[in-house]
Amino acid sequence: MNLSLDAQGLTESVQAEKSSPADQVAADLRRLIAHEIPSAHDIRLTALVRAAGGLSRENWSLDASWVDDHGSHSHRLMLMRDAAGTLLNTERSREFAVLKALEGTNVPAPRVHWMDPQGQFLGAPSVVMQRMPGVCDYMVLNGQRPLEERLTLARGFIALMAAIHGVDWRGCGLAQSLGLPKDSPARAELSHWEAEYRRVQLEPHPELDLVLAWLKAKAPATQAIALVHGDFKPGNALVLGLQITAKLDWETAHLGDPLEDLGWVTNPVRRREHQIPGHWERGQIVDAYQTLTGRSVNGADLSWWNVLACWKLAVIQLTAVHEFVAGRYNRVFQTPSWLYRPMFQMMEAA
């Protein structure tokens, strides 16, 4: 027996146990940077802090510097790493491709540096991107700001949505990286979320099955294919003053019907996030979107996307239940029965 090697291994084991999560993340990041930039040396990572926010991923902010064959570099970075339990089944390679494509557009989004799609270096699928200025505030449209400031931001958000839907996805190569819907966009998106529903379903939900049957029977045709964010909300953006400095969380982005995003923000159960009572409601949002894009919004089609938005929320909530039961998620969620009534009401009114 080699006692010196055994002692060394024991020392390394004790040191590993004493290392903090931040120390481990820093060590893993150094390995990723060294792999992506073989000539990099003097790699320094400072101010590494796990940030709040994100139900599906860990967010780590840090400052990084290094020297390579091209000189000295310094960057403010964000690491987005998949958590053990997740509410969204997504791929980092798709998110990375979208952010790369957006670098040449007028859509404010972080510039991506590297990805670890399988977690080879960071232990879980991850993306490292530029850290943008601004504050994330889910309720910025109904917070303490004066009404005119909130209306300015509300118009800014709908203008940002129009800019995303106006991205030249063909020219950006997104058809190759994201793929085009094989069926109509409505049916393709419904099929995706039905598969997620069946994957996480632990017990019968006849109400959700009833809504699903309605959605299948009423799926609308589409006017256009566009880049769709898939989770468009103030909570997935950064605001500095009256400026939206970045749109974040592109993990659900895909090519589809632009009414999907519009249906998400006009979904009545999310009105506190997206609307300002008496000033910026469904009618004003739709009018502004039509003016900005030149597209005519069919009311019945938009209502279908409103119902799907609620049904999608229900599936996400069931995913949380599934992950909790599996021991991968530490927050308790109830079944989404609170969503049944608004879905039935919208179906009756359609």
Image (cartoon, grey):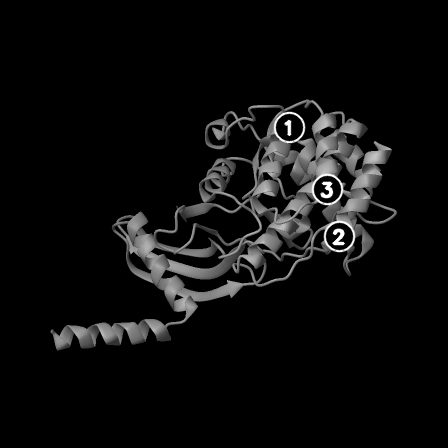
Name the amino acid type tagged 1: Arg
Question: Are discs 3 and 1 less than 8 Å apart at CB?
Answer: no
What number is the disc on residue 187? 1
Report whether residue 158 is seen.
no
The CA distance from mark 1 to mark 2 is 32 Å
**Residue 183 point in image, percent of width and height:** 59, 23
Between 42 and 180, which is closer to the camera in this rendering? 180
Residue drawn at point x = 57 percent, y = 58 percent: 325
Residue closest to the far right: 278
Q: Is 82 above or below relative to 299?
A: below
Camera-side residue of 12 and 233: 12
Q: Residue furthest front?
A: 204
The structure residue drawn at horizontal position 42% and vertical position 67%, both measured from the top left corner, is 22
For residue 337, above or below residue 216: below
- Measuring 54% from the left and 28% from the top, which residue is drawn there? 169
For mark 2, does the 10 Å Cα neighbourhood hold few (<14), some (14 to 19), or many (20 or more) residues?
many
Quarter of the image with the N terminus is bottom left
- What crowding class fits label 1: few (fewer than 14 Cα within 10 Å), some (14-19), or many (20 or more)? some
- The residue wearing badge 2 is 141
* Residue 162 rendering spot, x and y as whole percentages: 67, 34
In the picture, measured across the screen, residue 296 lies left or right of residue 69, that is right
